Amino acid sequence: MTNIVEVQGLQKKFGKVQALKDVTFSVAAGEVVGFIGPNGAGKSTTIRILLGIIKRDAGNAKIFGKDVWKDSLEIHQRVSYVPGDVTLWGNLTGGEIIDLFMKLHGGGDQKKRDELIRRFELDPKKKAKGYSKGNRQKVGLIAALSVDSDLYIFDEPTSGLDPLMEQVFQEEVEKIKDSGKSILLSSHILSEVERLADKIVIIRQGKIVETGTLDELRHLTRSTITLATEGDVAEIATVNGVYDFKQKGNQATFAADHQHINAILVKATELGVKKLEAVPPTLEDLFMRHYKG
Amino acid sequence: MKEEFARWDTLFVQFLKRDWKKIMVWVLGLGLFSAGFVPAFEEIAKDQGLLGMFETLQNPAMISMVGPTPIETAADYTLGAMYAHEMLLFCSLFSMIITILHVVGHTRKEEDLGLMELVRSFQIGRHANSLATFVETVFIHVILALFIAVVLISFKADTISVEGSFLFGASIGMAGLIGASIALVTAQIMPTSSAATGSALGVIGLLYLVRAGTDVLNVDLSMFNPLGWTYLTYPFTENHWILLVCGLVFTVLLSIIAFVLEGGRDLGAGYLPQKEGRGNAKKSLLSVRGLLIKIQKGVIMGWLIAFVIMGAAYGSIYGDMQTFLESNEIVKQMFSHSDVSIEESFTGTIMMVLISLVSILPIATVNKLFTEESSLRLSQLFATKVTRGQLYWTSIGIAFFSSVVGILLAAGGLGSTAMAAMEDRSVMSIMDFFAAGYNFLPSVLFFTGLAAFALGWAPKLGKVVYLYLGYSFILNYFEGLLDLPEWLLNTAIQSWIPRMPIEDFDVRTFIIITLMSIALMVIGYVGYRRRDMIEGI
Ligand SMILES: Nc1ncnc2c1ncn2[C@@H]1O[C@H](COP(=O)(O)OP(=O)(O)O)[C@@H](O)[C@H]1O
Ligand SMILES: [Mg+2]
């Protein structure tokens, strides 16, 4: 597999703020990469460097094997981008702005555009000053999805979209994924990207702290399990891989290592399960885990 | 019926609590602006000033701008007459405009923002909000009228009588109420609050234009114009209180119409349907140039029209220049160059003034690109095949184009009205005006170059270019008055350029400043290409 995006030891300072300290990751051809980190971690800064909007202080960044700063123009012909905060010209309509973006990018598909406008339920004849944040986001997304590119970069694309529209977005991204394009998807919420991402890159305070497939990362963490049994639930506490055990009557809540999940379930069945709830690890858990070591 | 207005008084008190700071600024600001210039006018009225001003303002062009005076001979023209003549129409206009913004803001805008839905869900009548707004507006204007009267009286000028002072204040207050009732009606009819504001302002603009015509042709016709019921009261001279009664009847009638209209419509919707925009872009928009022109068209057109009007305003005084200049020691000194005609001397200075104004436009055009950048509107465009060079040079191109057209319109407006005003006594041709105007083109380019340089290297300092423009303008304006040292004058770019038509054209200076400006633009481009785009700061 060839790497579409290749980032190595990226650094960027704004005045005294060291926004990026050490950012290294890659996006392979046909791969969807979730770029996760809390607000202010440096996601947008990384993406802006990739697009040649700002210049890196140190490190290397290549897209399609070309330097992101020097050859930005060639790169842009094959890249679609939607910024995290889409702001528009108030006196233009959504339809006009979509057409403008498509034209300035090149390679737009009118039929695709009209279909997306319908699917996202956007009123293209309304002036942009009347749009909500979600509607502005839709304008950016429709424009980016209507042009043909090899790499799509979305910076927190679903902030402001309601769940139904988020669903539409996920489906559209799935389509471009199926047609073999590469996608870099940033978010501060893990669940937003877990459905689509082949790989997760986690950034915190300007450093990549974890990289891997979702499964690989999940293994590093524990799910939170709530269990009620016929027998004495306290016996679960003795099983390997159970942590933070708390009991209330015959119901217990605890954290469970993924490697030991089978043993825990065997024990639970022995006791007779009355109720079982498992909550997958949240992003916070991943971070906590990383920091506690 | 009573239910429809239920609890308007609660809302009214609420409004006063919420708005009291705004009301203070409004009353103090507009009040002092309306009444506070008496000392300045006393200064103008000195010596033969009243006479000169009287003659100047007889010019139809001036009448169409400031309105007529009932005084027929210069001998009867007093300070009070002049004050009302020059100030009342403009102050009335301001009063209307502010009130329109206020009234639409309290009524239709709150509906658009969805605030009213909440309010209406309490036990509050359908018309309560409009009535509360209207009563608040009346309250504000009574205070404003009294404040203006008191300030006028406090100057104790002979011809500014107590009766006239109250009438002057009341006229401005009435203007506000007329504006309020117009806004109340458009707020019911129009589909959105911005359309309501726009159409109310449009009505006022139309009334102003119509009265410009009728004032010149036949003042009696202006009496049928709601705007006429303000400035034609002629405070300090004829004191036509009766016109205020017309205004009051008009206001009450329109307000009743507004309430009836409000009774028949849904919340958040007007009688006119929402105008749909375009679903697809026109071809002319689909380029960097198309976009940049589209988003600046309004501002550029506005300034261009202002240049013509400014030019025409100055041009209209060429006819009575002699009288005007002799009336005032300061003015005389400013425009005196011994061996040339007063008109030519005036042209040299006034062209500097006009072209300094023209320079604002290209600075604004270049600065606009940074505004767009920092407000994130270009983010998605940066990631297309649009280059930074395209953005930069297109902006410079639009700036250059608006400079050339701006000079054409300012010099043309000045020249053509001046020629008309001087009739056959003209000492200049229209070409002299254009030559004098384009003689200053390098200075406009220089300001453009400075703005471009800032855009490339220190975009946040783009606004400082305006400061430099203001500074060099002031230096040049007072050059003749104050004995400023050569080196200080030379810090202003306009000082390097000869004053045509009094002085001769200087090719060398013209070329050198132009080249310097181009160099600034190129250096700016180098910076613009290599700097970080600054987003969201
Ligand atoms: N133009 C800028 N000037 C100064 N500081 C900036 C600028 N852009 C980003 N930063 C800082 O860099 C850090 C990373 O920001 P950002 O990349 O926007 O984070 P994220 O997108 O992950 O929320 C933050 O501390 C932010 O305040
Ligand atoms: Mg961000």
Image (cartoon, coloured by chain):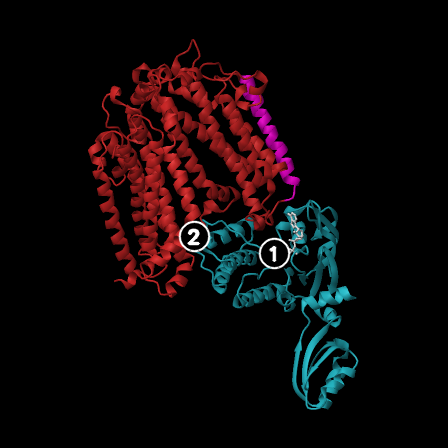
Residue under the image location 29 percent in, 42 percent down: B174
Q: Position of residue B276 (x, y in %)?
A: 39, 54
Choose between A101 and B487: the one closer to the eye.
B487
The local secondary structure at tag 1 comes to loop
* Amino acid type at image mark 1: Ser
Q: Are marks 1 and 2 in contact (CB under 8 Å)?
A: no
Left or right position of B517 against B258: right
Q: Is residue B241 magenta?
A: no
Of all residues, the one furthest to the top in this rendering is B339
- Ligand 2 lies under 8 Å from the Cβ of mark 1: no
Q: Which mark is residue B18?
A: 2
Task: Identify the residue at horizontal 31%, vertical 41% (top origin).
Answer: B173
Look at the image and give the colour of chain A. cyan
Q: Looking at the rendering, which quadrant does residue A214 occupy?
A: bottom right
Chain B is which colour?
red
On screen, residue A155 above or below A192: above
Residue B451 relative to residue A246: left or right: left
Q: Which residue is mark 1?
A: A149
Give, as a three-letter code, the residue at label 2.
Answer: Arg
Q: Which residues are magenta?
A: B507-532
Q: Residues within 10 Å of mark 1 (few under 14, many from 20)?
A: many
Give B273 or B536, whichever is nearer the viewer.
Answer: B536
Number of dots carrying numbers: 2
Relative to residue A25, is residue B352 depicted above or below? above
Label 2 resides on the chain identified as B
Respond whether the residues carrying marks 1 and 2 are from the same subunit.
no
